[in-house]
Image (spheres, coloured by chain):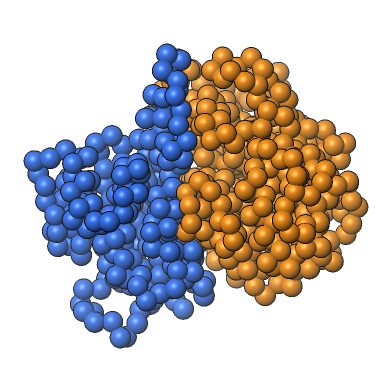
Chain colours: A orange, B blue
Amino acid sequence: MNSVYFVSDNIISPLGISTNENLISLEQKKSGLKQITNIDFLNQPICVSTLDNNLFDNVFSINNYFNKYTKFEKLCIASISKAIETIKFDYKNPDTIFVLSTTKGNVELLNKKNNPEIPRDRCYLWKTAQIIQEYFKFYNNPIIVSNACISGLVAINTAARFIQNGTYKHAVVCGADVLSEFIVSGFNSFFALSQTPCKPFDANRNGLNLGESATTIVLSSQYKSNIEYCNGAVSNDANHISGPSRTAEGLNIAIENASKNINLNENNCFISAHGTATPYNDEMEAIAFNRNKFNDMNIVGLKGYYGHTLGAAGVLETVISMHSLKNNILHTTLGFEKPGVTVPVNIVTNNKYVNLEYCLKVASGFGGCNAAIIFKKNE
Amino acid sequence: MNSTNYIISKQCVITSNKLFVNNKLIDNYSEINFNEFLKELYHEHIKSYPKYFKMDNLSKLGIIAAELLSDEFKNINGKNISIVLMNSASSLDTDNNFQKTIMPDNYFPSPSLFVYTLPNIVVGEICIKHKIFGETAFFISEHFDEKLMYNVIANVLNNAITELVFAGWIDVFENNYYVNLFVVKKNNELLVNQNELVNFTTENLKLLFNKYCNI
């Protein structure tokens, strides 16, 4: 079995257009969340982390045809370009697979009034993936993963397994979602949105914030880095399609299967939680960590910086977490003040400078799905 | 275990108001529309699961196909069963319906519809009905990608935890639909009807898929 290394990455978010800009903002505890009051289709404010539409005109002029792309496609193209330019490998050869993780892609095109110049078949996720593939001239057909909020981790896991068994040598994994009337209306109908910056694991948490990002990670068996993929697992609660399990059965199975043969403890590992700041999600996660005796393990939640970036979240939070291992820094869980779950959890409340070996990244989503991946730092 | 020891043990196809199990025509309703067909399939094969009527068409089709393959899951712990599905339209059929509820002159978004605007909800519905806790994944592809399907199933079965994979194609957009789901598992000498079994190979996945494309 081949070893899989995380060799390059890029984050485009309101906190920056490079991973480094994002890491600097995080260390300074800057959040991308802003309250917006004048939304024509809602009669209440929302708090979101959105990318300025003019970002592309000012910063990216990738080529003259850039206007034929949607915001989603521009974000993916910009993020992938930046991630692959730093390692200068021949990504056009058959050894490389492109994996796209998204929940809704160009869903705003379902409204005829939006982007009338863009052909409507771009609502199909395979079509938008094809457009991105053609831009880069990737050799293989893209793999498109759409598994609600665990999409990013399923994408990384799928790519890593293909590299482990030698099907491919490199994988370019891009996770992205953009906000639309569609997504905001849907989450709002669930009463899942907080009107103020979210408060992961906090006693006063009252919902999530939505966010936009495109994040790319390059996995390889040929290029080396000191961050290595260890294992990953996915599971289902078999309980409810829109509510997490009260016993955390599904997430517990994912964590157990992923950490089989690895002795994770508070002295060698930290958890990058899903931490959406909805009452039920955070409680369920806390129970899963408790069932695995991770009561003292450091837990970081990043939704207070980015909101919930849906199909990007798993990739975005993995990239931040691997840099946490590299740079020996655990970021403050922005929004958390006092514990609000029924079991003990050790939430990181201020930037903590520690040297750890492992990160356990978890996510859960609609459809009762859960995912856990583990990666490590080699000295 | 080498993937040559895996077999495709059962297949269920739903297309053009017909339902086949292991190549045998089980239901054939030529005179009714798609929604009536889905109702008939419920009364014929599911009977007492009223939740079915709250589901979108993608989930209804998945629930029917899973029921017809479910005797294969019976003696296996749900933690050791995996689901790998693929389609072209993702949840666009329901996305379109949700979009109609957020137009400015007609704004009434509902959470019970919004939750189905994700393709993997059908996976969750099948897991709930059959108590399946294992690995799940949903892939989007313009056409049935037998190579990706083969590789993902082999990767899951090569992992010691998974004993059986419920997999295949499940696509619906308005009145067009095609469901071709099957069970792949580790070969076991105790199995009867050996002649009905199909070796798990990329070529056989393609053959099983294409056979029903033009019905």
Q: Residue at horizontal 68%, vertical 20%?
A: A36
Where's residue A223, x and y in %? 70, 56
User: Which residue is nearer to you in this view: A353 or A54?
Assistant: A353
Residue A128 is left or right of residue A376, and the answer is left
User: Which residue is nearer to you in this view: A13 or A82?
Assistant: A13
| Numbered circles on residues, count | 0
Where's residue A352, x and y in %? 89, 51
Q: Residue at horizontal 44%, vertical 73%?
A: B77
Look at the picture and state if A26 lies above or below A89.
above
Residue A269 makes an appearance in the image: no
Q: Where the N terminus of chain A falls, by quadrant?
A: bottom right
Residue A318 is left or right of residue B144, and the answer is right
Write down the quadrant of residue B92 in the picture.
top left
- For this orientation, the residue located farthest to the left is B31
Residue A265 is left or right of residue B44, and the answer is right
- For this orientation, the residue located farthest to the bottom is B190
User: Which residue is nearer to you in this view: A228 or B14?
Assistant: B14
Look at the picture and state if A314 lies above or below B67.
above
Q: Residue at horizontal 38%, vertical 35%?
A: B94
Q: Residue at horizontal 40%, vertical 74%?
A: B76
Look at the picture and state if A52 lies above or below A266.
above
Residue B86 makes an appearance in the image: yes
Where's residue A8, x and y in %? 71, 47
Residue B29 is left or right of residue A52, and the answer is left
Where's residue B206, x and y in %? 29, 57
Q: Where the C terminus of chain A falls, by quadrant?
A: bottom right
Look at the picture and state if B28 lies above or below B204.
above
Write down the quadrant of residue B12 in the picture.
bottom left
- For this orientation, the residue located farthest to the right is A353
